[in-house]
Image (cartoon, rainbow, N blue to C red):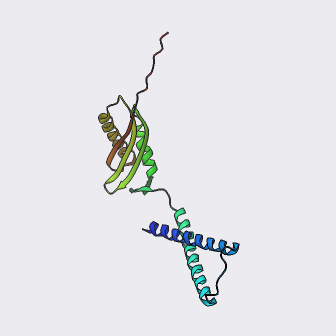
Amino acid sequence: MTKIVDRLLLFIYSLSIGIASVIAILLLSGVLPPQLDNMDGRRLWAIALTVAIIWFLLSLRFIFVSFRRGRQSQPTIDQRTEYGDIQISVETIENLCLKAVSRFRGVNDLKSRVKVTESGLDITIRAVVEGDTSIPGLTSDMQKAVHDHLEEITGIPVSNVSVYIANVTASPAFKSRVE
């Protein structure tokens, strides 16, 4: 929710600065003649002060947000053991998934995505397989390999392993050379 509010504030801030810049350029270039005779000086001064205060407060907010966001680190999975805390990054788990799946022949262009749920890890593997490979057998083996490898290495329960076969490629044809 905070991200949406910050984006909305940034949009309003940028839009108001843009409009003020265009008006200033038009006034200074002489395209718009300054006709401030209709407004008294106090009212114009109050409007300008209010706009300046709002711009200043929004600037402070964006400076604060930029520093706060810079301190955040990678998402991690935290575990507590009898000896202390363990933090494993989601990127590490994705790489472990890829390592488990890369051992299979006929599997290319691997990508993994990990979501942390209350029941455990929800893993999605995307792969391209060779055309002469049995897809049901291969995907079942891949699911089991990823599940077992992650639970063995990290100790984190894996609730679901989904395999998405994005495409099928032709098997490489090797010509034997006879001399």
| Residue with the most extreme top position | 179
The front one of 103 and 60 is: 60
Is residue 91 placed above or below 56 in the rendered structure? above
The quarter of the displayed image where residue 44 is located: bottom right
The quarter of the displayed image where residue 166 is located: top left
Give me the residue at 64% from left, 89% from top. 41
The image position of residue 94, as x and y in percent, is 43, 47
Is residue 124 placed above or below 77 in the rendered structure? above
The quarter of the displayed image where residue 63 is located: bottom right
Quadrant for the N terminus, please.
bottom left
The front one of 8 and 44 is: 44
Give me the residue at 58% from left, 72% from top. 19
The image position of residue 56, as x and y in percent, is 59, 76
Is residue 120 placed above or below 6 in the rendered structure? above
Q: How many marks?
A: 0
Say left or right for 114 vs 63. Answer: left
The image position of residue 135, as x and y in percent, is 32, 34
The front one of 175 and 89 is: 175
Say left or right for 175 vs 138. Answer: right
Say left or right for 166 vs 64. Answer: left
Is residue 47 placed above or below 112 in the rendered structure? below
The image position of residue 21, as x and y in percent, is 63, 71
